[in-house]
Amino acid sequence: MAVPGETEMNTLLAAAAVAAQITLQFNHPTPPKPTCNIKTVSYKFNGAPGTEFRYAGVKYVIPAEGSIELIASNKATQAEFGANKVELDLFPADDFGARTIPLTSSASTQKGE
């Protein structure tokens, strides 16, 4: 039996490498891309310290820092601020799914007049 030369050996190795790549591509389908249907993760309510509002049936008061962030409820689509109802999903979401809700009202400035 003849011993293959260097050229034949290189050709044989190249063919084996190509066959291995083709086999690996067909044996391993591409994994599915994960998706998440959650659009809003949290709401950050900003306002003057002491401002009261209701979210998901619970009363909250803005602390001295001027904001409070709450995990989004599956059922709550509005917050109550004074006599107003605020539609929460009208505010833009950031890259992390947080929406910032400003709690300011012309009604509160009119009370001080």
Image (cartoon, rainbow, N blue to C red):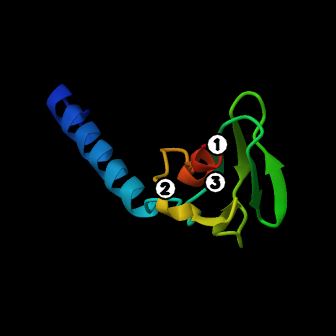
How many residues crowd mark 3 within 10 Å: few (<14), some (14–19), many (20+)? Answer: some
So how many labels did they put on this image?
Answer: 3
- On screen, 105 above or below 5? below
Q: Of circles 3 and 1, which is in front? A: 1
The image quadrant where one finds the C terminus is top right
| C-alpha separation, residue under disc 2 versus residue under disc 1 | 28 Å
Q: Amino acid at mark 2?
A: Phe
What residue would you read off at disc 3? Answer: 41
Residue drawn at x 27%, y 47% is 18
| C-alpha separation, residue under disc 3 versus residue under disc 1 | 36 Å
Outermost residue to the front: 113
Residue drawn at x 43%, y 59% is 30
Numbered label attached to residue 112: 1
What residue would you read off at disc 2? Answer: 91
- On screen, 18 above or below 23? above
Task: Mark 3 or mark 1: name the one nearer the start of the chain.
Answer: 3
Residue drawn at x 77%, y 59% is 54
Taking depth in this image into account, of 15 and 95 the one nearest to the observer is: 95
Q: Amino acid at mark 3?
A: Val
Task: Mark 2 or mark 1: name the one nearer the start of the chain.
Answer: 2
x and y percent of residue 96 in the render? 55, 45
| C-alpha separation, residue under disc 3 versus residue under disc 2 | 13 Å
x and y percent of residue 56 in the render? 77, 65
Mark 3 touching mark 2, by CB under 8 A? no
